[in-house]
Image (cartoon, grey):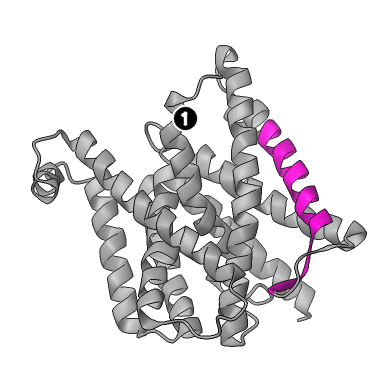
Amino acid sequence: MNETLKRAISGAVYIALLLTSILYSTESFIILFGIFLIITIYEFSNIVNLNKVFSILFGILIYSSVILVSHYNKQSELFLNNLFNSNLTLNANIKQLNLVLLGITIVVSIKCIIFLFYDSVQKISTSSKYLYLLGYITLPFIFTVKISFGTNDYNPKIIIGLFVLIWTNDTFAYLVGKSMGKHKLFERVSPKKTIEGFIGGIVFAAFAGFLISKFYIQPKPEFSDKSILIWMIIALIVSFFGTIGDLIESKFKRIAGVKDSGSIMPGHGGILDRLDSVIFVAPFIFLFYQILPFIKF
């Protein structure tokens, strides 16, 4: 079997599994991303030389606890009141928890961006490795699940739309870069990325955001213009932070001296290779959802 056919088959299986889990139910989506999290932690632990068993148990505990508290166990109100020493309602407590976790994730994301621009970094401290495990890997998986709920109930169209934007940005960044790219974007980390490809990815992702809002999300007529603007903004966030997320993972792999994070997907590498953009983008999309009610269009 040639490499192109392997890549096509493994990519098709990945997309089919992803779409089936998203569309079938909330639970199937959460379970699949829990499995993806375990694989991603295993791959990340290999790259940065962390204890795999401890790291996986740590990630599972954080992921399952937050998801259960946020979406399933109404008795968690008592737990959250004790945690925050308050007498707030469940929704208020969850908002507090979300803000705390989001704050941690954004801080670690900024640390990742700084790490990206440090040329001299060739070794990562143990404390930083565990910080990345928490804020770069585990919590972003949680926010990927959370943004699928939008501002209300679980909506599979939101998370499918997000993946379509990321795939569109990646595909056209590659095609435009390959055909027109002359100026390197970040050569010392990812020699193949170009400024032309980056701009092309943004343009086509913004167009995809327009199409998603107009023909897939299909909001009520009175909200149509607002929805189009929101999805085009999301496309810009995806393009910018998705590219940064891809570069950050490339930096980790470059320091480790490996080409791919794993080999579970023939022709594509590991799960982290497939989700590096998604998990870096997710907290910023969630942040956008939090400030959206305060924005006047």
Pinpoint residue 280: horizontal percent, then vertical percent.
52, 57
Q: Quadrant of residue 132?
A: bottom left
Q: Relative to residue 87, is residue 262 drawn left or right?
A: right
The residue that appears at 76% across and 81% down in the rendered structure is 1
Pinpoint residue 278: horizontal percent, then vertical percent.
54, 56
**In the rendered image, which quarter contains the C terminus?**
top right
Depth check: give the residue in front, 210 or 288.
Answer: 288
- The dominant secondary structure in magenta is helix
Pinpoint residue 220: horizontal percent, then vertical percent.
55, 16
On screen, 257 above or below 20?
below
Identified by mark 1, the residue type is Leu
Residue denoted by label 1: 292
Q: Relative to residue 240, is residue 30 drawn left or right?
A: left
Pinpoint residue 151: horizontal percent, then vertical percent.
40, 32
Q: Quadrant of residue 243?
A: bottom right
Q: Relative to residue 14, is residue 137 drawn left or right?
A: left
Q: Is 210 within the magenta?
A: yes
Q: Is residue 141 visible?
A: no
Q: Quadrant of residue 38?
A: bottom left
State which region is magenta. 189-211
How many residues crowd around disc 1 within 10 Å: few (fewer than 14), some, or many (20 or more)? few
Q: Secondary structure at mark 1?
A: helix
Q: Is residue 90 visible?
A: yes
Q: Residue furthest top?
A: 222
